[in-house]
Every structure is written in C-alpha cells, then in structure tokens.
Image (cartoon, rainbow, N blue to C red):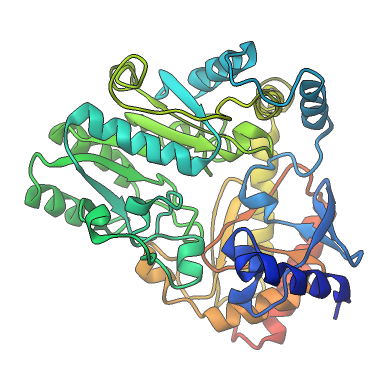
Amino acid sequence: MKNIKNSKNVFKQALKYMPGGVNSPVRSFSAVKEDPRFIKRSFGAYIEDIDNNIYIDYISSFGPLIFGHGKKEIIDAAKNALDFGTTYGACHMKEVKLAKIISKLMPSMEMLRLTSSGTEATMSAIRAARGFTGKDKIIKFEGCYHGHIDHLLVSAGSGASTFGEAFSKGVPNDFIKNTLIANFNDLNQVKKIIDDNKDEIAAIIMEPIPANMGLVLPNDNFVQEIRKICDENRIVLIFDEVITGFRASLGGAEQYLKVKPDMSCIGKIIGGGFPIGAFGGKKEIMENISPLGGVYHAGTLSGNPVAVSAGLATLNLLLHENKFIYKDIELKALQLKENILSEVKNVSINQLGSMLTIFFTDSSPKNFDDVKKCNFKDFGNFFRHILNQGIMFPPSQFETIFVSSAHTEKDINKTSEVCIEALKTLEIPN
C-alpha cells in the first residue's frame, strides 16, 4: 500500500471548507471507496501526489492533455501570454486566429463563440437552436453528459451517474419538461419521440461518440440516420464534442464519422489544459446571436488570452508538427486493450482512437442501460488495486481512459501487466 498520509491530512482540511472536500464530485474517489490523492505536480505521462507517489496518469484531466502534462510549447505559449496581461475584457487578435483554425478543422463551425467551459458552450448552443427555430423541446440521449445545466441534467452520465444523481435535486420540473430522453443507438425510439412531438423539437443534442458513460460506440449509420431525421424534420443537430473534438481525429467525431452537424460544442483540447469552450455552427444560426440578433451570449473571460494562447499552441502542434500523433496514440490504446483481453475474458473493452473504457460486463455496452449492468463493486476493487501499483485511471466506471503522446511503450506494458494482475487477483473468472 502506498503511503498517503499527507493526502489524508489535507483532505480532512478540505472537508471543512468544500462540499465533499472537492470542487468536482468525481475527484473525491468516494465512488470507488478510496481516499483522493492531492497532486503537487505533473510531467509527461505522470502525476505526483503530495506524498511523493508517482502514477502513470490516464485521467489526463478528463481529456484535454493529448500531449500529456507540461508540453513545453504549450507552457511557453501561456507564459509568454502572461507577459502581456491576464485578461482584457476586450477583443484581441489571438481569439480571431483560434476561431479561424477551429472553423477550418471543423467545417460545421462556420461561425463560433468562445466560452470558458464546455458547460457554457452546450448551454449557449441550446439557446441558439431554440432562438433560431422558435421551438422549445430538445432531445438528449440517456447517459450522455452535456455539463451541469439545469435542462440537461436529465438522465445524465459522467459524475451525475457516478453518484446516482442522473436527475439532480434543485432542478424544477418546469426546467426539464421540454427535455425528451432517448436511448442511444435506438433509432426507432428517436423517430417515435419526434412523431409524438411533431413540429415542437428545436434540437437533438448528442455526443456522437459518447464518452461520459464510459466509451460507448455508435452503431453503424446511427449518427448518419440521426442527421437524416433532423433534416427531414427541420431539427437542429448539435454535436457535443467537448471530449471528442480534436481527440477522435484532427477534425473530431465530425470528421471521423463523416457527419456534419448544424452546430458543435467543443472544449478541453482547444485550451491546452486551460479553461475554455466554444460553440458554433451554420452562419444562419449564429447570426442570431447578440449583437447581431436577439439570442444573448456573453462572458467576462470568454476568449481569455492565456487560454487562447495555450489553445493555439496545441492546435498548431497537432496541425504542423505531429502529423502522426493520432496513429501513435491509437496504437498505444489498442495495444493496452489487446494486452488485457488476451489474458482476461470476462471484461469488455470499448476503444476508439486514444480513448477506451474497461467495462466490468461480459459484452460491450451499446447504451446506458447496458453500462448500468456493470459490476461496480469489481470496478472499485480493480481501481484500488491498480492505484496502489501506480496506475491512475478515472475513478468511475462512467468515465473514459485517455492515452496521450507522452505515454511510452514501457508505460503501456506496465499498465497492461498491472491491470491483468489486478483482474486475476480479484478472481474475475476467465
């Protein structure tokens, strides 16, 4: 067992001042019956806690760190930006450059607005879709998480599901009465909901490749058919690519699946580890946003120059200096998956690109109902075992493992060995 005396002591202090001792629920590790680690530094593929324990990190801050921790070019860009100020409350040239690159790489975003988080991006996209269509109802998929917005905290994934709060307290029924829920990968149900609410649906918002109930893969042509249904019914299709944007491919899930939505929401990678988000879409929709139109959006720190500078450095690295990064990180994730499945049969692993999830169930989940059948007790035992062997996976069955370019073959091999040992030690039958 690792010594975590200092983390335990700081956690006791944190509990006095912050609910649950944390600023985001999943960090508490309570779902896996473990004490949280308090981190003092990160570098490459590793994080180090205040007890000097070093872990191979696959949380990757839940997605932004495609190059791992402390990539020099990104750090330098942020440091240089600080020499010119922390925030302006005014326009600056770099936000235009970032918008131009994003629009080029994700053609669905003909025009876009920067925000300070993915939650703000999805909130604003929904408002824009409603303003454009004049309709109120939206469809979301069970288990997909779109941030902690009142009208989207319905059948939500990620931390909301980790703590059994897919429906959050404090959300009035009037806020969610216009949010309709469908099962992911169930086209017939989507069609029925639309038929039952004819000409009332403003938008369908979806993670085209869900990564907030663990990684769940869309059936062949599922997303393409959703696109067709939206066209036939004049419904705005919104992709939530806060995780998959610039992660599933350079052009995100939009490029990977060859489906162009009407609007997209992104974040994480476009800030290089700093707080940022963006929403955008067709010009005819975005031109309804103030000051051009009557849909209001604003933000004191939107387009923050430090975050934008880090984001520019990240996207420029992806564009110009790392042409083979996506193949590299995909092969590492695939190697980890194949190594484990070659030794252990009664878990399933969904993997796409550099993302994967080990599900404690016999078959790969296709929707949230399938994910809920996982053995969460076994997941907790597994998590604690590998954590004490120096492997940091996300502390929830509902989250996704992220491989970065900083992970080495040695890291992948060690991780594979520790995972296999843990699964066999826990006597999960082969």
| Residue 214 falls left or right of residue 74 | left
Q: In which quarter of the image is residue 38?
A: bottom right
Measuring from the top left, give residue 177's x and y in whole percent.
Answer: 20, 56
Q: Which residue is drawn at 56% across and 83% down?
A: 377
Q: Residue at x 37, y 16 (%)?
A: 291
| Residue 203 falls left or right of residue 63 | left
Assign the C terminus to one quadrant of the image.
bottom right
Q: Is residue 343 above or below residue 131?
A: below
Q: Is residue 106 above or below residue 344?
A: above
Instruction: Count the marks.
Output: 0
Front position in the image: 111 or 304: 304
Front position in the image: 248 or 301: 301
Front position in the image: 425 or 18: 18
> In this rendering, does residue 389 appear at all?
no
| Residue 357 falls left or right of residue 6 | left
Q: Quadrant of residue 19?
A: bottom right
| Residue 109 falls left or right of residue 346 | left
Assign the N terminus to one quadrant of the image.
bottom right
Q: Is residue 357 above or below residue 15?
A: above
- The residue most toward the front is 17
> In this rendering, does residue 122 appear at all?
yes
Q: Residue at x 90, y 67 (%)?
A: 51
- The residue most toward the top is 93
Measuring from the top left, give residue 57's x and y in whole percent.
Answer: 75, 56
Q: In which quarter of the image is residue 372?
A: bottom left
Measuring from the top left, give residue 324's x and y in whole percent.
Answer: 69, 31
